Structures are given as C-alpha cells and as structure tokens.
Amino acid sequence: VQLGESGGGLVQAGGSLRLSCSASGSVFSINRMGWYRQAPGKQRELVATITSDGTTNYGDSAKGRFTISRDSAKNTVYLQMNSLNPEDTAVYYCKASSSGSYTYWGQGTQVTVSS
C-alpha cells in the first residue's frame, strides 16, 4: 500500500485547509485510514480516523473543528480543518491499517498556521 498526501500549506489563524490522502496498491486490505500529526519536539498524536464502514474517531484537539471523510471509489480520505490556530502547526501524516495488522504511513504534509 502506498499513500500520497496533499493539501498542506500556510494559512492564517481562523482559516481552513483540506488535506487529501490517496491510497494505491493492495487497497482491498485496508480497514482503517486516518491522520496523525507531529509538531516539533512533540510526540505524534491522533487527529482522526475512519474505518471502512464509516465509523470515525477524533483526537481531542480535532473535535468540533476537523472532519474526516472518505471517497471509497477513489480510495481517498480527506481531512477538512476549520478554525485553525497556531497550535495546529505540525506535519500531518496519513496512516492506513490493513486487516493483516500491517500499518502504512505517508511521507507527511506540512501545515503551518500563522497568528
């Protein structure tokens, strides 16, 4: 499974961004996809995940502001991020998990929120 992320960039506080993650390869084995982020000097943390049946889970920092969705036909997951603040600045990584307990990571996309 290969993951390709896009949509990161620089945005002002209060703005929005939408991240995309497209999966290719053995996509039939994927049962969960999601986003994690890592800020400088901090551990990687959960942002949001979505399962193959559409069940979503959000990290505390994302609740109420971010929305994860998927387009199964395109093997793509999206993360709509609203009301961004400087604390959201991080590298955002896409992750896919398969039924065989394999885990795949994208290379990451930088999100920078200016105050």
Image (cartoon, rainbow, N blue to C red):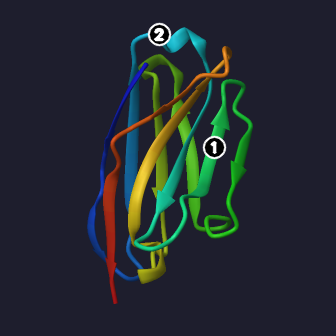
User: Mark 2 or mark 1: which is in front?
Assistant: 2
Between residue 16 and residue 95, name the one nearer to us: 95
For marks 2 and 1, the one nearer the N-term is 2
Does 107 sit above or below residue 43?
above
Q: Residue furthest bottom?
A: 115
**Residue beneath the point at 46% across and 62% down:** 38
**Amino acid at pointer 1:** Thr
Residue, disc 2: 26
The image shows residue 3 at horizontal and vertical percentages of: 38, 30
Between residue 66 and residue 104, name the one nearer to us: 104
**Residue beneath the point at 48% across and 68% down:** 82
Callout 1 crowding tier (Cα within 10 Å): few <14, some 14–19, many ≥20: many
Describe residue 70's horizontal placement relative to residue 22 as left or right: right
The image shows residue 102 at horizontal and vertical percentages of: 59, 22
Looking at the rendering, in which quadrant would you find the N terminus?
top left
**Residue beneath the point at 55% across and 64% down:** 43
**Amino acid at pointer 2:** Ser
Residue, disc 1: 49
Q: Residue furthest left?
A: 10
